[in-house]
Image (tube, helix red, strand yellow):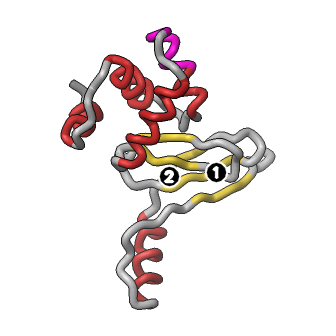
Amino acid sequence: MTSLEQRCTEAGLKMTGQRRVILKVLDGAEDHPSVEDVYERAKSVDSSISMATVYRTLNMLDELDLVTRHEFKENFARYELNTDHHHHLIDIESGEVVEFQNDEIEKMKEDIAKKLGYELVECRLELYGKKLKK
């Protein structure tokens, strides 16, 4: 059982064969796949998987906070496993999503919240840009 399957089981999610395939697709994704991407990848493993099953499973995983849903100023959602804290830089020309972490930004966010009298609970940082021409 993968760590994601274990987290699902601990959250009370029944593990069907189709859900296992979808979890495997998400666990192996090196990008931020859309619902359609997850569907195509899962269907190549198990042709009986329907788009409705993928939607339901992703929504359930999102509600259980096991995946994170992103829209990145697009007309569709992308998903990623909710594992480590990081931010995103989105290339507005190619749609490529680059994950990054930065200790200075983390400290700055905490300082801003504290100066305003808040404890920071959650923050999503999305940067949009174009690759510099060489």
Queried whether the magenta region covers residue 101, the answer comes back as no
Report x, y in % for residue 88. 55, 52
Residue at point 51%, 14% (across, down)? 43
Up-down relation of residue 103 to residue 80 (above or below): below
Q: Amino acid at mark 1?
A: Phe
Q: Secondary structure at mark 2?
A: strand
Report x, y in % for residue 83. 35, 46
Numbered disc in front, either 2 or 1: 1
Mark drawn on residue 72? 1
Whether residue 6 sits left or right of residue 75 in the image: it is: left
Whether residue 10 sits left or right of residue 121 in the image: it is: left
Residue at point 48%, 69% (across, down)? 105
Marker count (numbered): 2
Up-down relation of residue 99 to residue 44 (above or below): below
Bin the neighbour count of mark 2 within 10 Å (Cα to Cα): few under 14, some 14-19, many 20 and up: few
Bin the neighbour count of mark 1 within 10 Å (Cα to Cα): few under 14, some 14-19, many 20 and up: some
Report x, y in % for residue 122. 41, 67
Residue at point 39%, 30% (across, down)? 27
* Quadrant of the image containing the N terminus: top left
Per the rendered image, the range of residues in magenta is: 40-47
Residue at point 21%, 35% (across, down)? 9
Instruction: Determine the main secondary structure of the stretch shown in magenta.
Output: helix
Question: What's the CA distance linking mark 2 and mark 1?
Answer: 15 Å
Q: Which residue is mark 2?
A: 100
Q: Amino acid at mark 2?
A: Phe
Looking at the image, do the residues carrying marks 2 and 1 touch, with CB atoms under 8 Å apart?
no
Report x, y in % for residue 98. 57, 45
* Quadrant of the image containing the C terminus: top right
Q: Secondary structure at mark 1?
A: loop
Q: Which is nearer the eye, 14 or 106?
A: 14
